Amino acid sequence: MATTIAQKEDLLRNLPQSGGACLMYVDGAFTLASDGGTRKLINPANGEVSAVVAEGVKEDVERAIRGAREAFDNGPWGSTPALERAKLLFKLADKIDEHFTELSRLETLNNGKPVRETEYDVTDAANCFRYYAGLATKPHGQTFDVPAPSQTFVVREPIGVCGQIIPWNYPLLMAAWKLAPALAAGNVCVLKPSELTPLTALRLATLIEEVGFPKNVVQIVLGAGPVVGQHLAESHLVDKIAFTGGTKTGRTIMQAATGNLKKVTLELGGKSPNVVFADADFDTAVDYALFGIFANAGQVCSAGSRLIVEESLHDKLVAKVIERARNIRVGDGFDPNTEMGPIISRAHQEKVESYVALGKQEGATLACGGGRLAGELGEKGNFVMPTIFTNTRRDMRIVQEEIFGPVLVVQTFKDEAEAIALANDTVYGLAGAVFTTDIAKAHRCIRKLRAGITWINTYHPTYNEAPWGGYKQSGIGRELGTYGYDSYTEVKQINVNLDVVPSGWFSE
Ligand code: NAD
């Protein structure tokens, strides 16, 4: 079951358009690119054009940055009390809830993922705005009992103009993760969605306008990463760059940001271990092994892409995981029966498939999947079947590199020490899980994982309240929770002399 043209038009009807192209949100207005350029978005489920959008260039992002600078330096936002910022964010959260069905379907059109996943994303996005709305008015400073006659305290202030660059795998949710803490803390934002999936960010822009944020507090600029994103990272008028995406792009952005030494936070890739001990609850471990890698067709930074199983459990666990992986219903995200949707683009599908070929060449056993979805849907859309490799070695590239698709590699271990050694044996350190019924072992192992997001006897739950980010090459800094708020603030110490007399340090 796919979308009809009428349904598609209905989903796009709330996006401001001109000449058939959806407009970006720059300088307080919905606008075409300065050179009139556009980009066709391709529906990953069927290869059809889902929408045409403005394709910004350097001049457009320049204009947005200048507007943001003016808004931060001289606009009303700087003197808008935290309570008023909070009210706007609460209203935005309510607007998202009001448009729940529309936004989730638009996200499925945008990215291809099943509606049951996009419904989670929309709820999460609303709650993210709600969480930071609440946090805006909470205490953020400190006071210090320093030697008299001083009183010293610390306040947190907004950093200024924040450039925010996000990927395609959670388009609306990533926009919320970026905008909510930044706005709560009093910053202004220029957000650049992935060029592949800008639709829900544009719809969010219309809601932001309805809610009544002052001009240029939020702008949504569209365009290619190496053009618009690169300039956002380079501009000396931007004070902070917050990026979520691939590790290679993260490195480029960090280099681009050195010109004015802007603050940088990076949420990057992963190759996360899912460690299962023989004493784990079997059905739970099987269930989360599947959920860890096949949710969002494996296009999740924190995906449990390495299943690391105790030798004595290996055959039984892997047989069950394979049996269940074969039953996963792959298809169009609009079909209510679909459990796993498409890969975002044909190019990315080919990249995932090149890893399948590589795994075979490297000598791993392709135990399940590896091919495309059969039939007409499989020809038109970018579907890769749930794929599992066994008999792997730790030095194989399929074990070390992020594939970012529905490809699971299985490794085995003899004891706890080997489990941890394997788990930590990549350049990444984003996430990881341990499954065991031995509580002491669970805690011992989790503390030894070099990863920022960890789970015991579960995989993937993510909370707006808890910090998100990686060790090693999975990133710098943290999003979400109070950590996410802090990362959008400068810290200022204020010393007050309570005894206003000259110090007498130098003689008269
Ligand atoms: P990507 O790095 O290709 O692109 C991400 C964003 O960066 C896009 O908006 C893109 O236009 C922009 N970009 C590309 N080149 C740029 C440049 N030179 N300068 C500035 N911006 C540029 O990543 P992707 O393919 O969209 O997303 C997949 C990657 O994102 C995976 O590696 C995944 O692990 C990672 N990711 C990480 C997290 C996390 O929280 N750690 C979350 C989601 C995705």
Image (spheres, rainbow, N blue to C red):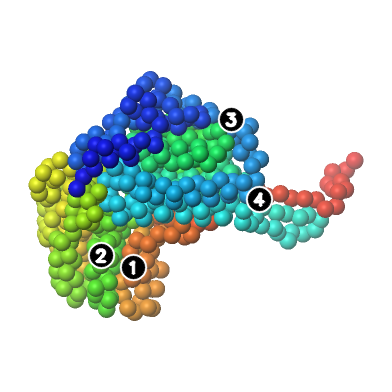
Residue on which disc 4 sits: 155
Give the image location of residue 227, x and y in percent: 37, 29
Taking depth in this image into account, of 174 and 58 the one nearest to the observer is 174
- Residue at (46% x, 43% y) in the render: 242
Q: In the drawing, what numbered circle is on residue 289? A: 2
Q: Residues within 10 Å of mark 1 (few under 14, many from 20)?
A: some
Helix, strand or loop for disc 4: strand
Q: Which mark is residue 148?
A: none
Please report whichever mark, 4 or 2, sits nearer to the chain's N-terminal start: 4
Q: Residues within 10 Å of mark 3 (few under 14, many from 20)?
A: some
The reply, left or right, for residue 274 in relation to residue 28 is: left
Respond yes or no on whether mark 1 lies under 8 Å from ligand 1: no
Q: Residues within 10 Å of mark 4 (few under 14, many from 20)?
A: some
- On the image, numbered disc 1 is attached to which residue? 458
Helix, strand or loop under label 3: helix
* Residue 52 vertical placement versus 284 (above, below): above
Nearer-the-camera pick, 56 or 264: 56
